[in-house]
Amino acid sequence: MDPFILAAHVQIQGAENIIDVGCGCGIIPLILSIRYPDLNILGVEIQKELSIFARQNVTTNQLENKIQIINDDIKNIKPCDINGKVDIIVSNPPYKKKESGRVNPNSQKAVARHEIRLDIDSLFHCSNKLLNKHGKVYIIFPAERLSDLILAMYNYKFTLGTLKFIHIKKGSPARLMIVCAKKGPTKNCIVESPLYIYSSENKFTDEYACLMKI
C-alpha cells in the first residue's frame, strides 16, 4: 500500500522533473505519469533485476517518453548526468536500521527493507545535491523514526513542510508518516489530518480507498 499512499500525496505544480529513489518495479513513476502526463520522471533502482522489471512495466504501459529507469546507486548520480537538478524527489526507502531486527536471507528483500545500501542520511545528502533551490522531498517512513528523519533533514538544510500520520485505525498508534521536506527554510510546518486505513467495522475507509485509484 505504501507506494500508492506516497504517490497520492505528491503535490504537482506542472511539468516538473522528478526522481524516484529506489523505484523498485516502477509503481510510483507509473502512477504519477498516468495522473500527471506532463511530468518527466527518472526512476533510480540499485538492484538490477528490479530495474529490469521497472523498464518492462514502463514499456508495457507505453510511457517510455515520460519515464526513464536507470540501474545505479543514487550516490553515484550527479546533476550533470541527468540534465540538471530536479524539482521533486520521492522515495519509499528501506525502513529498518541496518543493525536492527532480522535481516531477510533474500538479498533483494534485505536491501529493500534494511538500510544496507541506502539510509535516511544518505537520501537527504543526495537530495541536497540533486534538487534545485526550492526542491522538495516526499517520503513515507515509520512514524517511530521521526527523530531520525528530522536529524537527517537538519544535517542537509531541509525543513519540514508537511507531516501526515498514518494509522491502521482510530485509537491505534501511528504506523507510518508522509513527509514533505523542503530544501532551505520554510515558515511553518503543516501537520495534516491523519489517514486511517480501516474503519471501526474493519473496512477500508473512503479516504484510503480513494488513494488506491489511478
Image (spheres, helix red, strand yellow):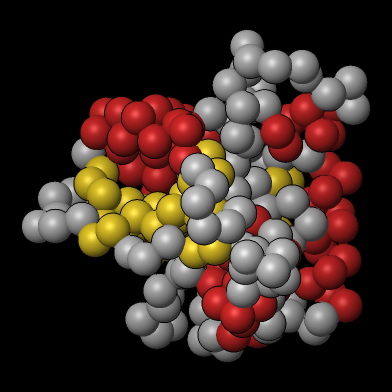
Q: Residue at x 78, y 39 (%)?
A: 47
- The one nearer the camera, 204 or 179, is 204
The picture places residue 150, in percent across and down from the top left corner, at 31, 35
- x, y (%) of residue 172? 53, 47
Residue furthest front in the image: 201
Disc count in the image? 0
Judged from this view, the residue extending furthest toward the top is 99
Q: Residue at x 13, y 50 (%)?
A: 185
Q: Residue furthest left?
A: 187
Question: Is residue 135 shown to the viewer in this render?
Answer: no
Residue at 63% from the left image edge and 11% from the top image edge: 99
Quarter location, residue 63: bottom right
User: Where is residue 58 drawn, in percent x and y?
Assistant: 79, 72
Is residue 5 found left or right of 89 in the rendered image? right
Looking at the image, is 101 positioned above or below residue 196? above
Instruction: Indicate the quadrant containing the C terminus: top left, top right, bottom left or bottom right.
Output: bottom right
Instruction: Compare residues 100 and 77 and report the one nearer the observer.
Output: 100
Image side of residue 61 versus residue 70, left or right: right
98 to 107, vertically: above or below: above
Residue 114: give x, y in percent of width and height. 67, 27
- Looking at the rendered image, the quarter that the N terminus falls into is bottom right
Residue placed most toward the observer, 76 or 139: 139
**Residue shown at 59% from the left, 49% from the top:** 92
